[in-house]
């Protein structure tokens, strides 16, 4: 009898292991085409199947902390869009490797190290989410459909299975992070983790909080665009006063009968049409973008705007910032690169940095999720590049203020290398708001040194 029970137990363990291997396919990456020599950091890529049928296959890049991976925090990073690849966040924002900023010359782009990578202080899972983003794919047409809530549920299931395969990281502090449209997903994902922890679902994840950069948060945030550009000196006093008087602070979906407001808004749009939205100080540039996704009724896409960035001071060899972005497409479509990354053949065609998705925006405000997480005592870091017109720091301040928590550390500068890096304010709900001076929509891309300093201090529970 004992032998039969032992045999049954071994069979169950074998089946469990086989099912786990089916759901998770992870492989180390030691070399990357375009980078000279072995990678000086630990990279793993893989797929995790989610949903009962596992027809949704989510692709990820995992990079261990370069400091103390045994105890440093784990970040789950979701790039915005929706539909912008995690590789974009890895390469252009917070990862340890990037492309040499030169124009494409027909050969494989050269990769160089980023000295201001956030992997200096944390291990990061860069997740291609929702399905259809980056190298994530669906095995059936039905599995390609997604929404805010479904993608967030799938993110939790991804983490659940990832931790089962990486139990050594369960004791590490966990944060969920992202920027731009991820302002809609990150608070939902964070709340799902919190709820599952409260329900006693194992494995328990040591959730500490979340981070968001220039996050899309609520439907009315574009109404703060006009006060923002006025403060930046881009429209006249007279037009601003007329807009306020005629539109009463509502500049989107204006009443068609309010002809004076419509005329003022049209004048405003004409004046601003040559301004680069993700960073108003940078020249406009042609973009290479997929089909647009409308964000809260905008006529132009956030993804389109995301691609319009032009040459900043740190990319002197390029005429356009977009020339730097284009390198990622040439690199990710190379057969040797895909082999090195362990991409499954035939699962996707041409890689697109920001893809058009079959995606429903079923959540139009993430403010209730912020309120709930605040009530539960979770930490949050909300940072804003202060020259971004896509999601302005004014709209972010407005929804933070609406949470109605008292200020515990009032508005003050934060300093990096004896220079003002921006301004910060902290609240009694353990939320810290930060502006990054001179940065655009994706702040670490523009101000990498300052953003790493910001992260280090906040992760260490130190004042900025």
Image (tube, helix red, strand yellow):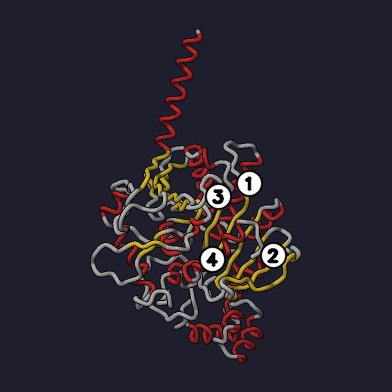
Which quarter of the figure is the C terminus placed in?
bottom right
Query: Which residue is painted at 33% across and 58% down in the image?
Result: 351
Q: For numbered disc 1, what is the local secondary structure?
A: helix
Residue at mark 4: 451
Most extreme residue toward the top, as rendered? 1
Q: Which mark is residue 62?
A: none
Vertical comparison of 348 with 398: above or below: above
Q: Earlier in the sequence, mark 3 or mark 2?
A: 3
Give the distance between the C-alpha atoms of the residues marked 4 and 2, in whole angstroms: 17 Å
- How far from the left and from the top, in percent, is residue 430? 69, 58
Q: How many marks?
A: 4
Q: Residue 186 placed where, x, y %?
A: 56, 55
- Secondary structure of the residue carrying tag 4 is helix
Mark 1 sits on what residue?
194
Q: Name the residue under label 3.
A: 72
* Image mark for residue 426: 2
Residue at coordinates 60% horizontally, 37% vertically from top-left? Answer: 201
Closer to us: mark 3 or mark 1? 3
Residue located 48% across and 42% down the image: 162
Q: Is the residue marked by circle 3 packed among few (<14), some (14-19), or many (20+) residues within 10 Å?
A: many
Residue situated in front as seen by the camera: 159 or 295: 159
**Dot in front, 4 or 2:** 4
Would you say 304 lies left or right of 424 here?
left
Q: Position of residue 52 (x, y in %)?
A: 47, 37
Of labels 3 and 4, earlier in sequence is 3
Dot 2: element: strand
């Amino acid at each position: 009898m004992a032998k039969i029970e032992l045999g049954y137990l071994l069979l169950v363990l074998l089946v469990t292991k086989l099912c786990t291997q089916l759901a998770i396919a992870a492989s180390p990456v030691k070399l990357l085409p375009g980078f000279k020599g072995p990678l000086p950091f630990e990279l793993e890529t893989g797929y995790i199947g989610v949903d009962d049928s596992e027809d949704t296959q989510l692709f990820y890049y995992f990079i261990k902390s370069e400091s103390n991976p045994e105890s440093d925090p784990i970040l789950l990073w979701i790039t915005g869009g929706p539909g912008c690849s995690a590789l974009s966040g890895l390469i252009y924002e917070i990862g340890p490797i990037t492309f040499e900023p030169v124009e494409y010359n027909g050969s494989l782009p050269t990769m160089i190290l980023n000295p201001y990578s956030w992997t200096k202080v944390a291990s990061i899972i860069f997740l291609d989410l929702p399905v259809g983003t980056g190298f994530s794919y669906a095995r059936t047409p039905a599995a390609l459909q997604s929404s805010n809530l479904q993608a967030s549920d799938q993110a939790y299931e991804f983490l659940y299975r990832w931790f089962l395969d990486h139990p050594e990281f369960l004791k590490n502090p966990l944060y969920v992070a992202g920027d731009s449209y991820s302002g809609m997903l990150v608070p939902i994902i964070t709340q799902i983790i919190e709820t599952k922890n409260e329900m006693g679902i194992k494995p328990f994840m040591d959730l500490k909080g979340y981070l968001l950069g220039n996050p899309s948060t609520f439907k009315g945030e574009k109404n703060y665009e006009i006060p923002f550009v006025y403060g930046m000196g881009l429209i006249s006093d007279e037009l601003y006063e007329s807009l306020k008087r005629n539109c009463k602070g509502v500049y989107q979906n204006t009443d068609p009968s309010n002809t004076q407001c419509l005329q003022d808004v049209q004048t405003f749009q004409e004046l601003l049409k040559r301004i680069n939205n993700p960073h108003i100080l940078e020249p406009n540039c042609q973009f290479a973008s997929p089909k647009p996704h409308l964000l809260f009724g905008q006529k132009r896409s956030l993804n389109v705007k995301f691609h319009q960035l032009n040459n900043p001071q740190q990319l002197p060899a390029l005429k356009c910032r977009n020339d730097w972005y284009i390198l990622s497409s040439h690199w990710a479509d190379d057969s040797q690169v895909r082999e090195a990354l362990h991409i499954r053949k035939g699962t996707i065609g041409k890689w697109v940095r920001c893809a058009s998705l079959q995606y429903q925006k079923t959540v139009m405000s993430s403010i209730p999720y912020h309120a709930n997480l605040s009530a539960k005592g979770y930490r949050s870091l909300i940072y804003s590049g202060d020259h971004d017109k896509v999601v302005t720091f004014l709209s972010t301040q407005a929804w933070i203020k609406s949470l109605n928590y008292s200020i515990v550390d009032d508005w003050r500068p934060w300093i990096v290398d004896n220079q003002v890096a921006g301004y910060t304010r902290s609240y009694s709900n353990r939320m810290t708001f930060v502006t990054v001076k001179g940065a655009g929509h994706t702040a670490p891309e523009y101000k990498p040194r300052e953003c790493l300093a910001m992260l280090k201090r906040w992760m260490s529970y130190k004042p900025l």
